[in-house]
Image: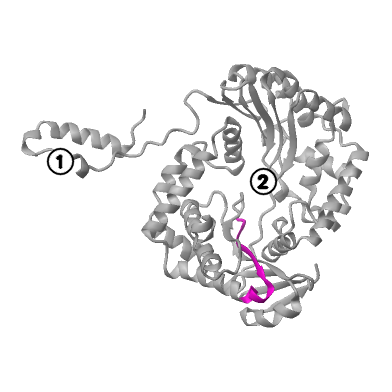
Amino acid sequence: MKLSRRASFGLVLAAALVGGCALFAPKPAWLLPPPPIQDAPVVEAGKLHRTTLENGLHVIVLEDFRLPRVALGVAVRRGAASDPIEQAGLATYTAEIMQRGAGDRDAFAFAEAVDDIGASFDVSADWDAMSVTFSGLSRDFDRLFSLLRDVTLRPRFDKAEADRARKEQLATIESQKDDPAALVRIRFAKLLYPEHRFGRPLIGTREAVAGLDAAAARGCYERNFVASNAILFVAGDVRAADFFSRAREAFGGWPAGEAPPVPPLPPATTPAERRIVIIDRPDLGQAQIVLGHEGIARSTPTRFSDSLMNNILGGGGFSSRLMESVRAEAGLTYSVGSGFSARRAPGPFSVSTFTRVPESRRVIDLVLKELDRIKQDPPSASELRDAKSETAGGFALGFETSEAIVAALVSLDVQGLPENALDTYRANIRAVTTADAAASARDRLHPERAGIVIVGPAATLAPVLESLGPVSVEKP
């Protein structure tokens, strides 16, 4: 085991003192400092293997022979953030069509091939990546691997399936108009990022998706699914040497290509004063509220203290300051929470809640008050200790399966984070001080210029919100 500089020095110092032990009476055990915490590695030694093929394809294998199962897939380091804004929803659309037939199998035959072996299969897109994933029994590995290769290298993009997928995506977008929680999230994103893809939902907008077709989806696939932009991964009952051999045979001829750069992110709108947008729903007796501003990226150096500060503010469930103030003391909501939506580029920081329409202004005032208070009265040592305990405990619970671990390893690659970030995470959390948490509150929270979006009856809400800042009213 490699010793840290501090631990190595401690052993040298102990050895030097042995010769003078008669000069010093031994201390009682209860006066000795606790031994340094040694975190168990997330991945057992010898189980994780990596290689990169000549075409630039990165391959990750996590061996786990405890169960006769495998989870495997391919991820590419581009997602919805790379959609042209006039084609918002393209990555989601492309992922959906890629599920509907590959190689010699049309949509029905492909679904039947997956069902025949009782496997799970998905193609999905988030902001920073698109991924193809399969899971099933290890005895069916050959068939799973063949299906993965077909979806990754030979998706069909049949016109009939593309047309059907577009209609379904448009129907989902239309249904969001009847969902106040969806409406408030969508409008909040547009308020913060009016000229960037982040300002449109992952699923896209009605105007953009209506113009998509099989050719657009194929273009998205061809730009992003190139070997040098991809990660091939597997976890479970498979040996690394065998998988590497199969990877070279099946994917070695995949052209390296060059993925297009991610469009630069224009700065989030950060005016000098608050802005309020009311989505007018006269029929609602309960208002949906989101407020916030630009947050952090996954690679932001202060992300550990930012996360703990947010845990104390509103990310820590019933123990958070927001829950204590707005729910427990005031009794104005069942739920209120805050969070950073960290992505490869800075995503939003937001506080979300709901309440009876007549209580909307009071709830917003309490939320803004807590944002101000944590800046003036930063997290205490006991609050920070509890947040660290909760965060570290939740981290451990998140990696009980090899499938979850390999997914996290792929995410680290996509986000450009260090390969050892899982093993150093708990130490980085423990290293956060109260001064760090105070700095995060001071530097990351800006209630004085937060954007506020509320869905409810404008005739009731507008008069009571005008003193907070300029108010605009919009239709759903």
In the image: residue 414, left or right of residue 312:
right
The location of residue 285, given as percent across then percent down, is: 73, 71
**Whether residue 383 is situated above or below residue 112 in the rendered picture:** below
- Is 348 contained in the magenta span? yes
Q: Could you tell me how far apart the alpha carbons at marks 1 and 2 are, in whole angstroms?
A: 55 Å
Magenta segment, which residues? 346-361
Q: Earlier in the sequence, mark 1 or mark 2?
A: 1
User: Which amino acid is tagged 1?
Assistant: Lys
The one nearer the camera, 229 or 247, is 247
Residue 415 position, x and y percent, is: 59, 44
Tag 2 secondary structure: loop
Q: Locate residue 334, reporting x and y percent.
A: 61, 62
- How many marks overall? 2
User: According to the image, label 2 marks what residue?
Assistant: 128
Determine the image quadrant of residue 191: bottom right
Kindly identify which residue carries mark 1. Answer: 27
Q: Residue at x 59, y 35 (%)?
A: 404
Q: Residue at x 57, y 60 (%)?
A: 338
Expressed as whole percent of the image width and height from the top left, the position of residue 231 reads 65, 33
Q: Closest to the observer: 120 or 165?
A: 120
370 vs 282, left or right, is left
Displayed quadrant of residue 289? bottom right
Snapshot quadrant of residue 251 = top right
